[in-house]
Amino acid sequence: MKYAVLIGDGMADYPLEKLGGKTILQAARTPAMDYIAAHGKTGLAKTVPDDFPPGSDVANMSILGYDPAVYYSGRAPLEAASMGVALAADDVAFRCNLITIEHGRIKDYSAGHISSDEAKILIETLDTELSTEELRFYPGISYRHLIVARENLGIETECTPPHDITGKRIGEYLPGGKDRKFFSGLIEASIVVLELHPVNLKRIEGGKNPANSIWVWGQGHAPKFKPFKELYGKTGAIISAVDLLKGIGIYAGLDVIEVPGATGYLDTNYEGKASAAIEVLKTRDLVFVHVEAPDEAGHEGSIDKKLQAVEDFDSRIVAPILKHAEASTEPFTILILPDHPTPVSLKTHTRDPIPFAVYRTDKANPDETDAFDEESVKKGSMGLVKASDLIGILVRDK
């Protein structure tokens, strides 16, 4: 049996008046996902335990079969693993976003999805100007970067994800709790360094949002995972544009497959990801394919962009992998799901259970589900499940 787990980050949504009361998944044209739902088993999955924030870290950890109550220690340490940044026992990794502040408010949590090349110059400048023996900056991808603090600095600091407070005054959401003065001061110092940086002056001249501040959040110590093969008896790999997913894969002992042109946005290399997934399954049992674009569109509050992202995920990821599975002489199991909802009306994540569908090419015993969306899957036979149990359910299903 080969397994393909296809994750459209943030695809789930709420009914929208502009779509006639339909959700994004209901309004989008998704024939491949609808086929999987109509010919397989469906249900709802709880990806975020009640006591955890509804972040992509917690949700995707659950999908990969790791119970956050056992394994979660913070978002940034997972990204550090993908970036090749080793953490000592008392190191604290922080996510460091490059953001746009205007009139004292967060205008853009991604600084206009700044390019990695531009961002690298800014982060290296910050490292030169602001790093100390206590703290270092590390460049990542686009607006997503890393800070590592020494000797447990900031582990008890209270931080808010910037995508949760777009349009809000920063003074109300600066770091709180222990070490708050240090990290609030770091944000303020970054503004001084970045505001008139040549990279930002050029972006402003070109009508783009400047990356004129950092924002710190998602901190934690390095986690300890059991290898995926030890837990589930399967070899596997992960394909994603974002360091968070790659980091989870590294800690799980999965192979991380790099796809040229994978960006984490609408312009990502969908075909490259699908082709890489098919190639991976020649030598491994299971592949996780993660696409970030629907989540980014949800954070932007864009119905049109989210519809495009979901339809691209269906036609350019799900459809070719489904076609390959149907043509294969080996039996295939395909699981499709988002990690969490990112409603365009809220521009942030929620903890609502997400729809999922499982299709096996060697079993024809479908549910009564006729489409893949938040309501249709409620007809399914799998009911409400704990997402971290899904992989175990799939590999034990004979």
Image (tube, rainbow, N blue to C red):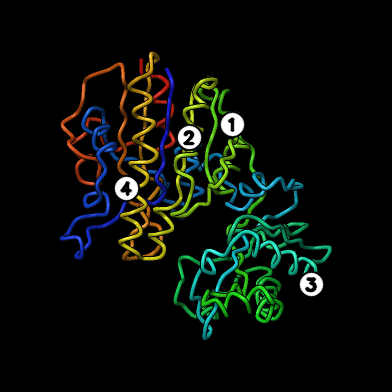
Q: Kindly state the secondary structure of the residue where label 1 is placed.
A: loop
Q: Residues within 10 Å of mark 4 (few under 14, many from 20)?
A: many
Q: Amino acid at mark 4?
A: Glu
Q: Which sits in the foreground, 116 or 47?
A: 116
Q: Amino acid at mark 2?
A: Phe
For the residues bearing labels 1 and 4, Cβ distance under 8 angstroms: no
Q: Which residue is mark 1?
A: 254
The mark that comes first in sequence, 2 or 4, is 2
The mark that comes first in sequence, 1 or 3, is 3
Image side of residue 263 versus residue 81, left or right: left
Tag shown at residue 129: 3
Q: Kindly state the secondary structure of the residue where label 4 is placed.
A: helix
For the residues bearing labels 1 and 2, Cβ distance under 8 angstroms: yes
* Distance between the alpha carbons at the discs numbered 1 and 2: 10 Å
Q: Which residue is mark 4?
A: 311
Q: Nearer the viewer, mark 2 or mark 4?
A: 4
* Distance between the alpha carbons at the discs numbered 1 and 3: 37 Å
Q: Kindly state the secondary structure of the residue where label 2 is placed.
A: strand
Q: Which residue is mark 2?
A: 288
Above or below residue 110? Residue 327 is: above
Q: Nearer the viewer, mark 1 or mark 4?
A: 4
